[in-house]
Image (cartoon, rainbow, N blue to C red):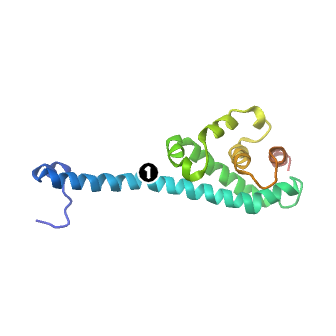
Amino acid sequence: MNSNKLINISDLSILPYELQDKIMKIYWKNSFKKQVINECNTINYDLLKIYNYMIKHGMPNIKLGAKNGLVRQHYFYYLNHNNLLKNIWKNKALILLSSKLLNFQLFQYDLYSSSTLFDNIDYCYKNIVIFYMLKTNTGVDHYMILNYFREISIQKFNG
């Protein structure tokens, strides 16, 4: 018999119940880790990356205003982070599961996303604006954030 051959799940029935139980526990534990824990860790990593960028680069640039010369350097990151957030928000079950770790409540995002506050902001910045508004504690008020992204939405189309 080839020792590299995997056991078919139907072959487990020939084993004693106790051994079947242990094998299935190991299988489901590993499966849970792959499908849930690793996904939560990825979400946590992405949100932490976006948060660190926001603190180090985003908020200081917002304080300078949308007319400063550095705005164009941030477009790539804003768009990239917005897309990451859009994909994260789609998986509401994992957001709920990891909300304790992330200190984030899904209902807050849902309230903001359905608001008319963002009507004048380009869709490619909407998620990043919501994230900045929910996570800011750096002395930048929500009006500054909204105004900044409204202005860069206009700049994007006008030059």
**Residue 38 image point, x, y percent:** 46, 56
Q: Residue at x 50, y 41 (%)?
A: 93
Q: Judge whether 108 appears above or below 77 on screen.
A: above
**Residue 42 image point, x, y percent:** 52, 56
> Three-letter amino acid code at disc 1?
Val
Q: Quadrant of residue 19?
A: bottom left
Relative to 15, 62 lies left or right: right
Q: Residue furthest right?
A: 67
- Residue beneath label 1, please? 36
Query: Looking at the figure, which quarter contains the N terminus?
Result: bottom left
Q: What is the count of numbered marks?
A: 1
Relative to 141, 46 lies left or right: left
Q: Residue at x 70, y 50 (%)?
A: 135
Q: Quadrant of residue 127?
A: top right
**Residue 91 image point, x, y percent:** 52, 43
Q: Residue at x 25, y 52 (%)?
A: 24
Q: Residue at x 11, y 53 (%)?
A: 16
- Identify the secondary structure beneath mark 1: helix
**Residue 61 image point, x, y percent:** 82, 58
User: Alpha-carbon neighbours of circle 1 within 10 Å: few (<14), some, or many (≥20)?
Assistant: some
Q: Quadrant of residue 110?
A: top right
Say which of 131 and 125 sits in front: 131
Relative to 147, 132 lies left or right: left
Say which of 6 and 129 sits in front: 129
